Image (cartoon, rainbow, N blue to C red):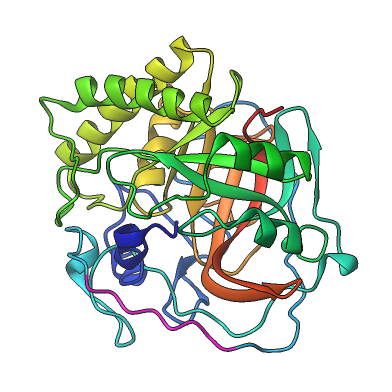
Amino acid sequence: MADGLLRERRTAALSAACLLLAGGLALGGCATTDGTAAGDASGATAVAAAGDAGGSPSVSAPAPASASASASVSASASASASDSASASASTSASGSAKPSASAGTPAAATARPAGTSSGSVFTGLAFDTCTAPSAATMNAWRGTSPYGAIAVYVGGRNRGCAQPQLTASWVRTVSTAGWKLIPLYVGAQPPCQTGSSPEKITAATAATLGTADGADAVAKASALGMRAGSTLYLDVEAYSAADTACADAVLTYTQAFDRAVRARSYRPGFYGFASSSAAGIARAAAAGKPDLPEALWYAKYDGAADTTSSFPYAAGLFTGHRRGHQYQVNQRETYGGATLTIDRNAWDAPVAVTG
């Protein structure tokens, strides 16, 4: 995700994090700093299958257009324990990695549909960016870009970017124009993650913080006009997958967050990194743990705009339109005369209920 300090943290060492696999998980497709896939591109099958069989419909990658200036990435934030293991020459060790941005832009929407939706589920391409763009920019991108949904940071003490545009009026305007919204809440971060996050989990406070943050996420989304039934995605950044105490605290926090969200008639989702935070949720799902997110949005920078072949866990997990895949980051794109730096996502999962 592209949110202030969190964007910097993600810039550095996904390749390093891949060396620290979670509890025997055979995670494949870890990204190198040039955005190419390393390791087993088919993804891991070490997590036992859980849930219903089958897979989510895939989303094909957008065709590249003429090259545009690459958005180079530098990072200066403190690294999480897992991610400081090593760093590539092109980035500084400061968190779970984002590869350098590639030149090129997806083809315009005239060459491909923006996506399809059914109820609260959207299937297609989505983007996220640090600060919610103006309504004018959203209007310029609507119908000229390949995207049909945008992720927005609705709250959380660790939300790093100002959101002057993100109001109930903005939500009404862009939703009426046809955009689907993916609400993201930057909650407390793992206890083993270094850095100066304003809110961090501890073993003692994990359940209390999760309950409070889940209630706050619902309040923030509701104030923006996102109604009951909306899926709210909890953003948990990378941590050392080898630190079981850290992973346990994150799971306790997430379960409490999920219970609080469900108690208010909203639905919990989760955003995390394929080699650590998302892997912890996949492992818990395979083990049949209670109070887990209903949808999993995983960051795996392999350039594959799909939610099936790139899925790094057992094929039976999070099926039935419950997957999102952040596959490229820091892409500078221009549509309708408006330019943004965004992260690209393949989406086949629930979104906010508006209107």
Q: Nearer the viewer, residue 66 or 271?
A: 66
Going by the picture, which residue comes out furthest to the top? 263
Overall secondary structure of the magenta section: loop
| Residue 201 in which image quadrant | top left
In the rendered image, residue 31, in percent from the top left (x then y), is placed at 45, 70
Could you tell whether 156 is left or right of 353 in the image? left
* Residue positioned 39% across, 45% down in the render: 279
Quarter occupied by the C terminus: top right
Going by the picture, which residue comes out furthest to the left? 204
* Residue positioned 70% across, 42% down in the render: 173
* Residue positioned 24% across, 64% down in the render: 83
The residue segment tinted magenta is 69-76
Could you tell whether 280 is left or right of 116 in the image? left
- The answer to whether 248 is drawn above or below residue 178 in the figure is above
In the rendered image, residue 127, in percent from the top left (x then y), is placed at 61, 57
| Residue 250 in which image quadrant | top left
Quarter occupied by the N terminus: bottom left
In the rendered image, residue 170, in percent from the top left (x then y), is placed at 61, 43
Q: Nearer the viewer, residue 9 or 38?
A: 9
In the rendered image, residue 88, in percent from the top left (x then y), is placed at 30, 82
Q: Total marks drawn?
A: 0
Could you tell whether 198 is left or right of 293 in the image? left
Q: Is residue 355 visible?
A: yes
The question of residue 247 being in magenta is answered with no
Q: Is residue 290 visible?
A: no
- The answer to whether 310 is drawn above or below residue 340 in the figure is above
The question of residue 72 being in magenta is answered with yes
| Residue 154 in which image quadrant | top left
* Residue positioned 50% across, 79% down in the render: 101
Going by the picture, which residue comes out furthest to the right? 110
Q: Nearer the viewer, residue 40 or 175?
A: 175
